[in-house]
Image (cartoon, rainbow, N blue to C red):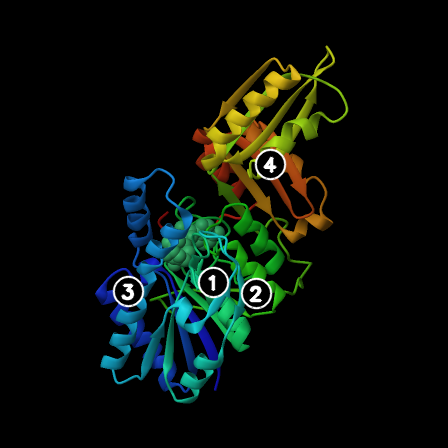
Amino acid sequence: MALIVQKFGGTSVGSIERIEQVAEKVQKFRENGDDIVVVVSAMSGETNRLIGLAKQISEQPVPRELDVMVSTGEQVTIALLAMALIKRGVPAVSYTGNQVRILTDSSFTKARIMQIDDQKLRADLKAGRVVVVAGFQGVDEHGNITTLGRGGSDTTGVALAAALKADECQIYTDVDGVYTTDPRVVPKAQRLDKITFEEMLEMASLGSKVLQIRSVEFAGKYNVPLRVLHSFQEGPGTLITTDEEESMEQPIISGIAFNRDEAKLTIRGVPDNPGVAFKILGPISAANIEVDMIVQNIAHDNTTDFTFTVHRNDYLSAMRVLENTAREIGAREVIGDTDIAKVSIVGVGMRSHAGVASRMFEALAKEGINIQMISTSEIKVSVVIEEKYLELAVRALHTAFELDAPARQGE
Ligand code: ADP
Ligand code: ASP
Ligand code: MG
């Protein structure tokens, strides 16, 4: 008998019919004798709808109140799923984050889980009940409702699995596993049987939204066996693992991630003295704006151009800060661009292969795609390009690194 935590995402509980299907699936596991804790998201579109309501009141809603509101989406689905299970004769009980006591810090809209009280859950499981827990939400030490950031139900699932020392955490979604890249952008993308935590972490942090970054961090830290599966189709899904065996057959690149959420800012003609980077980025970080990629160029006249990227939501505030800095340090001008995208190739195979980056640049050059910025680490290479070339770039790289699925007959 196993203890399994199963998380169902928004589309998987997007209608009453789907919720009934999820209940049927959980019932089957239960009949197999497994203990089941289910984590659900809000019905698809609901979190966006709620955020939209808040934005009609204020462009920047008070984060505490936003959390009070967006957490309601998950409260609806836990109750509906519990009802559907009970209707089938499966004893079940639903809990909000507060009721379980998923304790988080107080960073509203992006809270981190600190501790989970598993007593109630264990008692319910012992009594033969399926426990249904609201994803995405917790409570801080003062009793305020918090949420864990978009996609946060994945993290609730993994954190519960870690707390309960579950045998497996299964993330059920609308694709049948983790693919070499988003299958909605590249139809020739292939499902991976396995991917390492390290690679999955890079993929998630570079824009693959199939798993929230923190859920992968948690799973790696607490060694939670994690699997991504299709909610309603049978199949092995993708296992996220720690082992890096099979080096002989290992592909150089495991996946391609992309991200349209960034914007680029450049400050031109900065007098090139020691401390320039700090003068430029210090005020940005003081304004609580996170910087991703950074490039500094030396010009001929002892001035430098300095470019960096931030989240698109922070673009306007970053621009204001940078214009101030430009005046103070006597820089020539500040320019910005929101029509950019970041494309990244990821793979532990890069460690043992040279020339991966140049192969990437060659593939982009062949398509006439200009690279604006580059950043590399041990297992990834990222480039910033014009947003309109994003899909072309991802497809070209997918082909260049031999990730395309073999054509089926008739294609
Ligand atoms: P859920 O609502 O179940 O949490 P998400 O929309 O958050 O589902 O995540 C699943 C989606 O992630 C897929 O529909 C797919 O379009 C997208 N995705 C992005 N990159 C990948 C990838 N490498 N492999 C699989 N899916 C991916
Ligand atoms: N409902 C939340 C969101 O849409 C959390 C989740 O689905 O994981 O981001
Ligand atoms: Mg998700």
Q: Nearer the viewer, mark 1 or mark 2?
A: 1
> In the rendering, which numbered label is found on residue 286?
4
* Residue at the spot of label 3: 76
Examine the rendered structure and indicate whether residue 74 appears above or below residue 162: above
> In the rendering, which numbered label is found on residue 398?
none
CB under 8 Å between callouts 3 and 1? no
Residue pictured at 57% horizontal, 65% vertical:
219
Residue pictured at 72% horizontal, 42% vertical:
354
Q: Distance between the residues labelled 2 and 3?
A: 27 Å
Amino acid carrying mark 3 in the image: Val
Amino acid carrying mark 1 in the image: His
Q: Where is residue 161 in the image (x, y as percent from the top left)?
A: 51, 72
Q: Which of marks 4 and 3 is in front?
A: 4
Which picture quadrant has residue 229? bottom left
Amino acid carrying mark 4 in the image: Ala
CB under 8 Å between callouts 4 and 2? no
Q: Distance between the residues labelled 4 and 2?
A: 32 Å
Outermost residue toward the front in this view: 142
Outermost residue toward the bottom in this view: 127
Q: Where is residue 111 in the image (x, y as percent from the top left)?
A: 49, 56
Helix, strand or loop at disc 2? helix
Residue pictured at 28% horizontal, 49% vertical:
49
Q: How far apart are marks 4 and 3 (CA)?
A: 39 Å
Q: Compare marks 4 and 3 and give the one earlier in the sequence.
A: 3
Q: Compare marks 4 and 2 and give the one earlier in the sequence.
A: 2
The residue nearer to you, when weighing 192 against 113, is 113
* Residue at the spot of label 1: 142
* Residue at the spot of label 2: 219
